[in-house]
Amino acid sequence: MREDHSVSDGESDVYQPEPTKKVQRCKTVKRAKGKARKRKGSENDDTDEEVTGVINANRRPHAVTLHEVVQAKSIRVALLQWYDKIHELRGMPWRKVYNPEFGPAERAQRAYEVWISEIMLQQTQVATVIPYYNKWMAKFPTIRDLAASDIETVNSLWKGLGYYSRAARLLSGAQKVVKEFKGRLPDNAKDMEAEIPGIGRYSAGAICSIAYNQCVPVLDGNVHRLLSRVLALYTPPKDKKTLDILWAGAGTMVEGADRPGDINQAMIELGSTVCKVRDPACDACPIRPRCRGYVLSRGVDAEQVWCTSDIMSGTDAHAESLDIEELCTLCKPLPLPEGSPELVTVFPMKAERKKAREELDIVNVIEWRSSTGKNDRWFLLVRRPDAGLLAGLHEFPTEADVPTDISSSETAKIPESLLSELLKTPLRPSKRSKADGDVGLQIVQVRPAGDVLHVFSHIRKTYRVNWVVLEGGSKPPELMPFCPASTGKAVIKGQRGRAKAKRAKNDDTNDDNGEIEVLEKTEARWLPLEEVAKANIGTGVVKVWNKAKALWGE
């Protein structure tokens, strides 16, 4: 099982893996050198540049076959011997021994349990997930129990885990399984990935190998790192060719295996606990003798490191003997020289991170107070649509994605505009005084509370918080009902910014932001002061709430 990783198969359904070029290993030195000399002696300068681009002086030339898993059976034996000793140490309730005696119904139940754990573990630590998983399975012990629930209940159990689109996809996936698959997840990775919302290539491989004993690979962040080091692959980590190589290596590891689920879990566990991003415990690694990254870091006879019997194909020839066409052209120059003890940690190559886009939202913590003098304090929450960013959660009325140079006077007008859409009773002009008699419902205060920064996967949100006080009447003002448009699309009342939802595609990514229109209704409700923190609100809204409470000393 995974721990705190990003999924590496987001584009797996976009391209077909390129066929691996089969080459003879380690031919004679003279042939390769002769070709190189001939090219260097050519009058064509472009040819010289091509050769120097292939054989980079900053990294020893090596064959493309270096990046293939060889002697997979011996690696599997070492992995499973290690895994059998440690698989229970972290007390994961979803990790169970595969039982070949299970019938279809029991295997489908295991698939449901693994599915829940896998989705929860995306971008989340194991220790954090365990209590959530136990609570979830107590509430929804079967997929039918989950399918019969609603987004409000699901979110209440998910509260605090983040990436709330995962919870919504679990619910929609369960409902589809019950409706179209008689309550059982498909028993093969191909159908599972194609048919079930939110299940991509990684999740399908994990579920089907563990629950159904299907020989299908997994490639999460931990396995990506592990295989990048084992294969000494130093290429852009998200490049299609890189992923082709790593998926092929992961596939070799489980091909024809008796225990594919345990092999996949062993690789994930090894990457999580031993082959860590920083300070890998190489001395404790059961497959260290097969790790080419480790060999490079120890500077073991660099002239022959590529073709030794333990590492490559059982021949003692040098990589220099390969034809120029047989050399790897994908790997970039290593940032450290061979023999550097820290060299293991440069694999995999670091990805270039896209700069998160900056957005400013005006968030209004709207409070209603009774005109009768009672100490009634009620706050307005708006429920988000059942799909997309923070699906089904509640928040304070918000003007989303406003210009960053919005003036204070423009900001002060926003609460009245939002309330005019949310309230059945029109607001009275705020300039009228109580001396004028019954002033009705009016805004008596708009007070800035400050800014709150909340970071999503690709968005840096700044929430500019206003504390808005509304007075009038003896009970909270009546709100507008659900308001679906005639087209089926909904406008989020009080949110004039972009109403977007994540595309409903099958992948294992966790971005709670997207680029399609929402097809849901919206509701608003008043909650008493003491109930706000108990509502289904995300961590960003909790920050906003705490910011507002600081104004009145709580």
Image: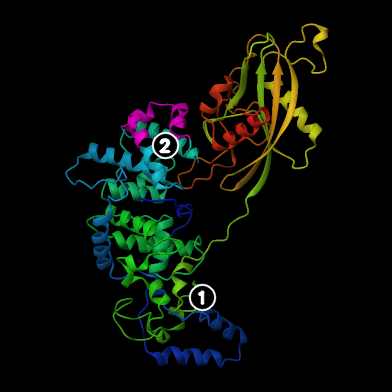
Q: Secondary structure at mark 2?
A: helix
Instruction: Kindly report the distance in space between the C-alpha atoms of the residues bearing marks 2 and 1.
Output: 44 Å
Give the x, y percent position of residue 192.
36, 44
Q: Which mark is residue 336?
A: 1
Give the x, y percent position of residue 301.
38, 84
Q: Is residue 468 left or right of residue 234?
A: right
Q: How is the image coloured?
A: rainbow
Mark 2–mark 1 contact, CB under 8 Å?
no
- In the image, residue 363 sits, relative to residue 8, either above or below, namely above
Q: Secondary structure at mark 1?
A: loop
Q: Is residue 533 left or right of residue 101?
A: right
- In the image, residue 432 sits, relative to residue 46, either above or below, namely above
Labels 2, 1: front one: 1
The C terminus: image quadrant: top right
Magenta segment: 134-159
Question: Which residue appears farthest toward the top when viewing the image?
Answer: 437
Question: Which residue appears farthest toward the left when viewing the image?
Answer: 101
Q: Tell me the residue at 61%/46% (across/down).
A: 459
Q: Which residue is under mark 2?
A: 170
Give the x, y percent position of residue 173.
41, 36
Residue 138 in which image quadrant: top left
Q: Amino acid at mark 2?
A: Leu
Residue 157 magenta-highlighted? yes
- In the image, residue 361 sits, relative to residue 92, either above or below, namely above
Q: Tell me the residue at 30%/36% (across/down).
A: 184
Residue 138 magenta-highlighted? yes
Q: Which mark is residue 446?
A: none
Q: Tell me the residue at 28%/70% (across/down).
A: 71
Q: Amino acid at mark 1?
A: Leu
Give the x, y percent position of residue 384.
57, 30
Q: Is residue 225 left or right of residue 485?
A: left
